[in-house]
Amino acid sequence: MPELDGEKPGCTSDELALAKASDAPVYILGYLVIPITTSESDDDGGTKWIAPALDCYPLKETQLSSRGSHNEITVTAVAEGEPSATLFAVPANYIERPPSQVDAEYWTMYNEHLFDNVRRLDQDYYKHRTK
């Protein structure tokens, strides 16, 4: 098993301890993963397979609900490194709108409101808007 030294920003100390104590290594996409059972309440929970080498990012997650739902999320590819700057570029046709305009357009399309408190959202929007 690879050595797990130092802190990993996305890992809790409990997750790192489990990773170090694991005696049956499992790999997903070539990364060592540690299954961790989760429980958000007494009835809901699941398992996530975290990759310590990726700051404990879960490469697989199974979510179970007392209401009967069962969801599985599995990462199919990992590309390490800095993301392309184009991912953060604002599209040329982008139009910035305050929440009230977005809500009005949503109302026109779906005959219901998107936001509960548009006035407060507009106040926050204009207060924090870059000049």
Image (spheres, rainbow, N blue to C red):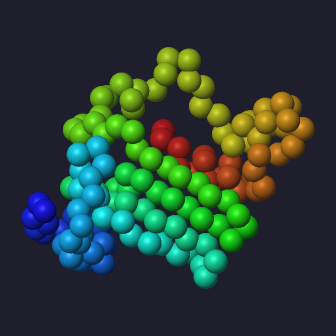
The percent position of residue 96, horizontal first and vertical second, equals 59, 31
Q: Which residue ends up furthest to the front in the rendered image? A: 24
Quarter of image, res 10: bottom left
The relative height of residue 120 versus residue 90 in the rendered view (above or below) is: below
Residue located at (38% from left, 56% from top): 58
The percent position of residue 22, horizontal first and vertical second, equals 23, 72
Is residue 123 found left or right of 36 in the rendered image?
A: right
The relative height of residue 44 versus residue 129 in the rendered view (above or below) is: below
Residue located at (90% from left, 38% from top): 111
The percent position of residue 89, horizontal first and vertical second, equals 40, 27
Residue located at (65% from left, 34% from top): 97
Quarter of image, res 100: top right
The relative height of residue 40 versus residue 62 in the rendered view (above or below) is: below
The front one of 54 and 59 is 59
Q: Which residue ends up furthest to the bottom in the rendered image? A: 42
How many tags in the picture?
Answer: 0
Residue located at (13% from left, 62% from top): 1
Q: Which residue ends up furthest to the top in the rendered image? A: 92
Quarter of image, res 43: bottom right
The front one of 122 and 14 is 14
Is residue 56 found left or right of 74 in the rendered image?
A: left
The front one of 108 and 100 is 108
Is residue 107 found left or right of 85 in the rendered image?
A: right
Q: Does residue 116 show up?
A: yes
The percent position of residue 31, horizontal first and vertical second, equals 24, 50
Q: Does residue 56 show up?
A: no
The relative height of residue 94 versus residue 64 in the rendered view (above or below) is: above
The front one of 30 and 129 is 30
